[in-house]
Amino acid sequence: MTLHACRRLLAAILLALGLAACGSNVNEETFALIEDGMTEQQVTDLLGTPSKSASTGALGVSGTTTTWTDGDVTISVQFVNGKVWLKQLDRAKP
């Protein structure tokens, strides 16, 4: 891990800890901190306990789709072999 990556991870963790005192971490600010290659644990540390998660695996490749929801905001992250592959933020329409 490069020094730049370590600094970003530390900033994400500190932000997550600071936001934990203020309420939900399911928002655009924390979504922006999720990067390709982060581990499931790093994302969970950032967003908190997921609302739901589903896993599958075949031929030595594992995949997990994990979702965090708070109010009208939903963050979905797809992991391949335990690392962020895709991320998406959705807002429910009124």
Image (cartoon, grey):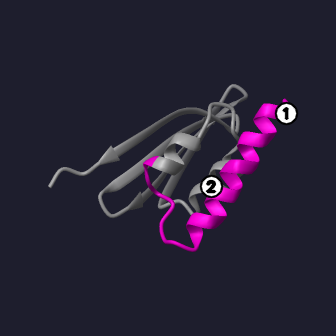
Q: Which residue is drawn at 38% across and 52% down?
A: 74
The amino acid sitting under disc 2 is Leu
Please report the bounds of the magenta region as a residue range. 1-28
> Which of 66 and 34 lies nearest the eye of the viewer?
34
The answer to whether residue 1 of the structure is visible from this angle is no
Residue lying furthest bottom in this view? 21
In the rendered image, which residue does mark 2 sit on? Answer: 46
Q: Which residue is drawn at 47% across and 61% down?
A: 51
Q: Which is in the foreground here, disc 2 or disc 1?
A: 1
Q: Position of residue 11 (x, y in %)?
A: 70, 49
Relative side of 10 to 35, left or right: right
Number of the label disc, if any, that sits on residue 3: 1
Relative side of 74 to 82, left or right: left
The answer to whether residue 5 of the structure is visible from this angle is yes
Of the numbered discs 2 and 1, the one sitting upstream in the chain is 1
Q: If the image is split into quadrants, where does the C terminus sit?
A: bottom left
Residue lying furthest left in this view? 94
Residue lying furthest top in this view? 59
Cα–Cα span, label 2 and label 1: 19 Å
Q: Position of residue 59 (x, y in %)?
A: 69, 25
Q: What element carries label 1?
A: helix
